[in-house]
Amino acid sequence: MLNLVLFGPPGAGKGTQAEFLIESFGLIHLSTGDLLRGEIAAGTKLGLEAKGFMDKGELVPDGVVIGMIKSKLEANPGTEGFIFDGFPRTVDQAIALDKLLDENGTPVFGMMSLEVGKQELINRLLNRGKISGRADDQDQNIIENRINVYNEKTLPLINYYKSQGKHFGIDGMGTIDEIKLRLKEVIEQKLNSQ
Ligand code: B4P
């Protein structure tokens, strides 16, 4: 199984590149952001709870997102693998993911970490906000808070995966196609070296 963690700050291109990885490697896409927005749209209790955090650019509590991922893993046995997009976002989430995957005997293959400068992140998200109407993409203060939360709570995950020899840094600046090629090359190189 090929379990990939697609990592990077808000606006780094995780959701964008996940679409290509699904096609190329036949993986199931698990985006906690999409799952949470689905709960909000459906008006569930979980969605109502999550909305308050997301609108401010804060992280939704670990227990909520870990529970969502657990039920998705259980609902998809025997797949080629998963792309975890926007998850894990804290060290506790990463530990929980390792435990869940250990139960299936299929560990994380690698963390693909997209590296993009702050001003480019802000530009991309403000642009998306104009088109999609996503509330958390329309206000520069909320975007900056998301980037600060990323730096404080999510960035330490790089060391978590480095210590397991699973961190792969990828230049996330350039066109979407250029970044696709970089990702594909890194994954194929690692697959061939096994
Ligand atoms: P997410 O939905 O994960 O949103 P995101 O970080 O903004 O990244 P996304 O994947 O959507 O955007 P992308 O970079 O592809 O999270 C939203 C919120 O949900 C969080 O703030 C948090 O509150 C909550 N949440 C989610 N997961 C959680 C978790 N595990 N724990 C706790 N809370 C959680 O793309 C951005 C834009 O850039 C797009 O418009 C795209 O077209 C554009 N773009 C991409 N690549 C480009 C390129 N190379 N050049 C130019 N533009 C590009």
Image (cartoon, grey):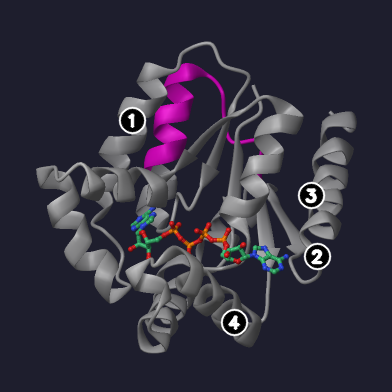
Mark 2 or mark 1, which is nearer to you?
Answer: 2
The percent coordinates of residue 127 (x first, y second) are 55, 76
Q: What residue would you read off at disc 2?
A: 175
Q: What residue would you read off at disc 4?
A: 123
Say few, some or many: other residues with alpha carbon within 10 Å of mark 2 (under 14 / 14 to 19 / 20 or more).
Answer: few
**Along the polypeptide, which appears first: circle 4 or circle 3?**
4
Secondary structure under badge 1?
helix
In the image, is residue 107 part of the stretch drawn in magenta? yes
Looking at the picture, which amino acid does disc 4 mark?
Asn
Mark 4 or mark 1, which is nearer to you?
Answer: 4
Q: What residue would you read off at disc 3?
A: 183
Q: What residue would you read off at disc 1?
A: 70
Secondary structure under badge 3?
helix
Q: CA distance from mark 4 to mark 2?
A: 14 Å
Mark 4 or mark 3, which is nearer to you?
Answer: 4
Q: CA distance from mark 3 to mark 2?
A: 13 Å
Q: CA distance from mark 2 to mark 1?
A: 34 Å
**Along the polypeptide, which appears first: circle 3 or circle 1?**
1
Q: CA distance from mark 4 to mark 3?
A: 22 Å
Mark 3 touching mark 1, by CB under 8 A?
no
Secondary structure under badge 4?
helix
Residue found at the very far front of the displayed protein: 131
